[in-house]
Image (tube, grey):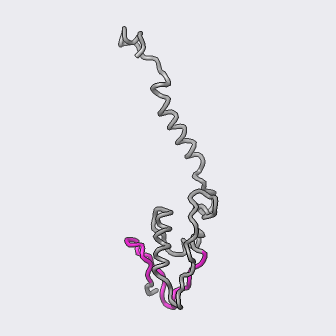
Amino acid sequence: MDSVSQLDPSLPRKATTRGFGFPLAVLLAVAAVASSGCGKKGGSGDAANRPGSPGYLPPAVGQQFVVDGQIDLPGLTAAVRRYSQWKMRVPKDLDELVASKYLTNLPAPPPGQRYAVDPATLEVTLSAQ
């Protein structure tokens, strides 16, 4: 407290950077980060998964989801779970993983079936179309 306000508390106190410096610095830092756009470019609204881009996640290990002629559902499930951690949400379908370049390919499901992602367990299953 300065000596003038100690003498007469009705007088306004001087505004100093001591009271406003830290919150103002935090506000400016937050504004700078927000104005940077978080690395996303215009277009599809989803940043491309490229090395060097913010939030880059290496493609799923293996990328081979057919083993001995059978679709590797546990491997697809693991890829969906890692993708969900990366994006912090459940994908609409497996095509979203390919569109974001997290998966390079997706094996065709057996005739009359399609891939389904259980939003509660993030498990990939085959279901009837």
27 versus 39 height, above or below: above
Question: Which image quadrant for residue 108?
Answer: bottom right
Give how far across and how far down residue 118 sits, in percent. Answer: 40, 75
41 versus 123 height, above or below: above
Horizontal side of 11 relative to 76 (left or right) equals left
Which residue does the image show at 49% across and 78% down from the upper left? 75
Q: Nearer the viewer, residue 8 or 44?
A: 8
Give how far across and how far down residue 79 sits, in percent. Answer: 50, 73
78 versus 11 height, above or below: below
Horizontal side of 50 relative to 2 (left or right) equals right
Of all residues, the one furthest to the top in this rendering is 7
Q: Nearer the viewer, residue 37 or 65?
A: 65
Give how far across and how far down residue 13 sits, in percent. Answer: 43, 17
Decide whether residue 112 is among the magenta residues. Answer: yes
Could you tell me which quadrant the N terminus lies in?
top left
Which residue does the image show at 44% across and 76% down from the upper left? 117
Give how far across and how far down residue 40 sits, in percent. Answer: 60, 56
78 versus 47 height, above or below: below
Which residue does the image show at 41% across and 10% down from the upper left? 3
Number of marks in picture: 0
Decide whether residue 105 is among the magenta residues. Answer: yes
Horizontal side of 95 relative to 42 (left or right) equals left
Magenta residues, as a range?
A: 104-125
